[in-house]
């Protein structure tokens, strides 16, 4: 099925009165997810948003609850506010990242209400990529520029119209109510086939990566890898799967909030204990941790590589630390025989 | 908001005479003594300043001024000994350079000039201290409440 | 340029072979088009990796504190000024440094190119021209047009302190008004300036890439990480961002060498230099001081004169 861009624009504008519409919007030269009121505000013809879509469910700085001293007692109020939302234009890499984040925030042991309530009330409309950049490597990470994982429905840009594919139950319900759907004609089918074959052409190879890393904790490779890293948070803040956070108090005499904000394992103070001891005192330990967490620990704990190949980290890095190069070096590293 | 929250500006309530809150950093040896002299001499001046005693005007970290504004102060006054009379010889000379740069940059980013004030008041200048406070209070009142170049929104931020 | 690169290779090789330095800090080709990346050469065989051209945009002075022992460093004009300030502040010993000074014509700002061509697929640097193939089209740029803003108004393209020199000396163009960009901002009204800075601060995501890319920001505990007193929460509203940026600019007063590493590191394109250049201009006009130009002239806030201007005082 497909829907013409004009008709979709009308549907979009109508939905905007009921739902919070979040879509890529250009703001001072950067494209990022923002609240939009109509389809004309949505950016067309871009590669990907600068900052990842994880902020839709896991905001950079959110108040968890507020508290107030009242007489002898304290009142605590949950600060979570959710409204029904439609997130439009989420690329397959970011959408797949949602499934990885789900493993952290919504598993057998724990359901994070802040993440989950937002996730449950949001319809994710993915937008497949029509072009790939040389820095993209999603196909090598097990997905593709047109994969549906993590979306409720996927739109594929056919030029004048979007092909529509429902993925989840929520998505099927939405498509069922969608006005203006048409059948795909022969020309559309051909275009669709070509688009569906789109892959990234990187040489990154993760097939043996996790196993290799199992034996590499003490490898000398980590000694030189970290040297040029600045220890800033640019890569982690740009990454759709990075999810480390800090919980702090913002206290003002008689009332305050408990706040959760993004943190980064690349920051020196990330692992500093209250006692003053820091188990990852040097950059070497932190870079090793980054690689091991994404490509080894997360696999052992959750069964998946925690990278979707979006390429934002290597583009954002001021000193050109390149994850692809690191993966390559790890693959080629000679294991030190003890 | 998705990425972060934009704070709203504070509205001045109608029909209420605005009493600004001014944080005054006074150096222990001159300005604080001068303020003390004003008090002892029963010289009246507006009760708008909240005094913080510091050993020397050179002790001022620009963050003190910024944090005062972030926590809702409508104005800031920093006062030290006259150059040449510093109890620590050169503290206020260093401070003079710092203050000039702070004032210049804060005005540059759009903070009203009259919100952040600097003066040299000696221990003998009780009357003059009162004049300085009157002047600062008048100017800050005219500007109205701190409207947010640095002020953090209600129920945000911390005063730890 | 290739003659210069050969000379740098030769010098680096000699230094390593003679054991005069343990490591040469320089640039090698990056994995993205038009991007160089810092590298640390420890054996004479590896010196061939070193490059020098308009893509070498990081400030390598950032690394001298973390690398112990004797080091050689490839340094452009602004980088040498940063080294001078670090020496003045006792962060690095002169004897531990062998400065390979290079005269610099400026570095490319990739964001300026990407704004027109989309993500860069490939590029070629020739004399004064850059031919780029991007995802949104191809274009040929004159180097002067895509030079980083810092370099457009550079006052010190030649190293101010060095042990060996490479490249022909660069003449600074006749700048009619130094800091013309700051003057233009000063001439706007208070509300216009406020609106501009609020807009810029709304972009900041507090990743601290600017702080980490700056060679002058080396405090063991930065004020943003301090818990008592807690100057800043993690909140990314414009007011807090403004406090961070203004606080950082004031901590750099009299020390910032205007290398532009902060702006190039920023993933969001915040105009950080609008703040730091204002402070730098004030130091020049009020105190006739520029950071890191001579080893004998300490940072502006480390010295004072009895004649310093005090126009900022209250009128009472």
Image: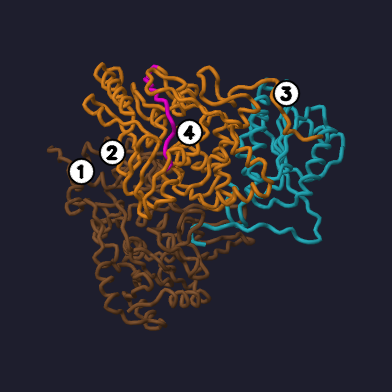
Determine which of the numbered discs, if any, sits on residue A216 in the image.
1
Pick the front one: B54 or C84: C84
Judging from the image, what secondary structure is the residue with disc 1 in? Answer: loop
Judging from the image, what secondary structure is the residue with disc 2 in? Answer: helix
Region in magenta: C95-109
Q: Are marks 2 and 3 on the same chain?
A: no
Judging from the image, what secondary structure is the residue with disc 3 in? Answer: loop
- At x 75% / y 28%, what residue is drawn? B30
Q: How many marks?
A: 4
Q: Are marks 1 and 4 on the same chain?
A: no
Q: Chain of mark 3?
A: B
Q: CA distance from mark 2 to mark 3?
A: 53 Å
Q: Is residue C42 above or below residue A271?
A: above
- Estimate how packed mark 1 is, as few (under 14), some (14 to 19) or many (20 or more) residues with alpha carbons within 10 Å: some
Judging from the image, what secondary structure is the residue with disc 4 in? Answer: loop
Say which quadrant the C terminus of chain A sits in: top left
Q: Colour of chain C?
A: orange
- At x 56% / y 26%, what residue is drawn? C290
Q: CA distance from mark 3 to mark 4?
A: 34 Å
Image x and y of residue A45, in percent: 40, 62
Q: CA distance from mark 1 to mark 2?
A: 13 Å
Q: Which chain comes out cyan in the rendered image? A: B
Say which quadrant the N terminus of chain A sits in: bottom left
Q: Chain of mark 1?
A: A
Residue tagged by mark 4?
Answer: C259
Q: CA distance from mark 4 to mark 2?
A: 26 Å
Q: Is residue A96 left or right of residue C45?
A: right
Residue tagged by mark 3?
Answer: B83
Magenta region includes residue C97: yes
Q: Nearer the viewer, mark 3 or mark 4?
A: 4
């Amino acid at each position: 099925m497909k829907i013409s861009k004009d008709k979709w624009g009308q549907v979009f504008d109508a939905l905007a009165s009921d739902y919070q519409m979040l879509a890529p919007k250009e703001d001072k030269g950067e494209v990022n997810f923002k609240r939009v009121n109509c389809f004309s505000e949505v950016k067309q013809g871009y590669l990907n948003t600068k900052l990842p879509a994880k902020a839709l469910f896991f905001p950079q700085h959110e108040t968890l609850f507020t508290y107030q001293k009242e007489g002898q007692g304290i009142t605590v109020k949950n600060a979570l506010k959710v409204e029904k939302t439609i997130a439009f234009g989420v690329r397959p890499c970011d959408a797949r990242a949602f499934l990885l984040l789900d493993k952290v925030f919504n598993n057998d042991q724990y359901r994070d209400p802040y993440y989950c309530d937002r996730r449950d009330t949001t319809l994710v409309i993915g937008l497949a990529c029509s072009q790939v950049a040389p820095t993209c490597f999603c196909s090598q990470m097990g997905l593709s520029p047109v994969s549906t994982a993590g979306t409720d429905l996927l739109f594929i840009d056919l030029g004048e119209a979007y092909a529509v594919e429902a993925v989840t139950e929520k998505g099927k319900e939405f498509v069922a109510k969608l006005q203006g759907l048409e059948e795909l004609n022969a020309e559309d089918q051909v275009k669709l086939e070509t688009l569906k074959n789109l892959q990234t052409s990187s040489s990154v190879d993760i097939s043996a990566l996790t196993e290799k890393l199992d034996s590499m904790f003490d490898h000398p490779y980590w000694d030189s890898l970290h040297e040029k890293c600045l220890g800033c948070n640019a890569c982690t803040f740009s990454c759709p799967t990075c999810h480390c956070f800090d919980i702090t108090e913002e206290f003002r005499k008689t009332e305050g909030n408990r706040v959760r904000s993004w943190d980064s394992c690349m920051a020196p103070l990330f692992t500093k204990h209250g006692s003053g001891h820091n188990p990852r005192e040097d950059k070497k330990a932190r870079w090793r941790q980054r690689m091991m967490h994404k490509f080894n620990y997360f696999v052992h704990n959750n069964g998946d590589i925690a990278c979707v190949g979006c390429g934002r980290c290597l583009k954002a890095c001021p000193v050109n630390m390149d994850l692809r190069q690191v993966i390559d070096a790890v693959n080629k590293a000679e294991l030190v025989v003890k | 908001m998705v990425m972060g929250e934009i704070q709203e500006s504070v509205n001045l309530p109608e029909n209420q005479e605005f009493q600004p809150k001014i944080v005054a950093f006074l150096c222990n040896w001159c300005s604080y003594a001068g303020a003390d002299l004003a008090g002892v001499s029963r010289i009246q001046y507006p009760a708008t300043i909240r005094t913080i005693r510091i050993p020397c005007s050179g002790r001022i970290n620009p963050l003190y001024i910024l944090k005062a504004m972030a926590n809702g102060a409508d104005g800031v006054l920093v006062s030290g000994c006259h150059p040449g009379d510093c109890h620590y010889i050169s503290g206020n000379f260093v401070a003079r350079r710092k203050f000039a740069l702070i004032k210049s940059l804060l005005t540059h980013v759009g903070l009203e000039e009259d919100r952040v004030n600097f003066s040299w008041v000696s221990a003998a200048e009780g009357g003059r201290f009162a004049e300085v406070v009157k002047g600062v209070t008048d100017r800050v009142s005219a500007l109205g409440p701190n409207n947010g170049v640095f002020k953090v929104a209600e129920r945000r931020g911390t005063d730890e | 340029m290739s003659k210069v690169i050969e000379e740098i290779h030769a010098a680096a090789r000699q230094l390593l072979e003679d054991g005069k330095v343990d490591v040469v800090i320089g640039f090698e080709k990056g994995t993205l088009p038009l991007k160089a990346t810092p590298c640390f050469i420890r054996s004479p065989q590896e010196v061939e990796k070193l490059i020098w051209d308009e893509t070498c945009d990081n400030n390598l002075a950032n690394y001298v504190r973390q690398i112990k022992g004797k080091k050689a460093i490839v340094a452009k004009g602004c980088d040498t000024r940063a080294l001078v300030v670090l020496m003045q502040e006792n962060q690095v010993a002169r004897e531990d440094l062998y400065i390979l000074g290079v005269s610099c014509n400026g570095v490319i700002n990739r964001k300026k190119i990407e704004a027109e061509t989309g993500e860069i697929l490939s590029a070629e640097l020739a004399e004064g021209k850059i031919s780029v193939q991007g995802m949104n089209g191809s274009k040929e740029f004159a180097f002067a047009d895509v030079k980083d803003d810092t370099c457009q108004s550079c006052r010190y393209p030649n190293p101010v302190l060095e042990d060996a020199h490479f490249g022909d000396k660069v003449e600074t163009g006749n700048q009619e008004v130094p800091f013309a960009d700051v003057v233009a901002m000063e001439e706007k009204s208070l509300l216009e300036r406020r609106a501009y800075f609020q807009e810029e601060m709304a972009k900041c995501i507090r990743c601290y890439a600017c702080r980490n890319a700056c060679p002058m920001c080396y405090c063991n505990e930065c004020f943003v990480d301090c818990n008592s007193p807690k100057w800043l929460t993690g909140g990314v509203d414009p007011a807090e961002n403004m406090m961070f940026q203004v606080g950082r600019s004031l901590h750099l007063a009299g020390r910032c060498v205007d290398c532009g590493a902060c702006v190039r590191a920023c993933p969001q394109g915040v105009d950080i230099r609008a703040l730091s250049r204002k402070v730098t201009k004030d130091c020049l006009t009020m105190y006739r001081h520029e950071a890191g130009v001579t080893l004998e002239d300490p940072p502006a806030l480390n010295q004072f004169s009895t004649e310093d201007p005090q126009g900022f005082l209250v009128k009472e």
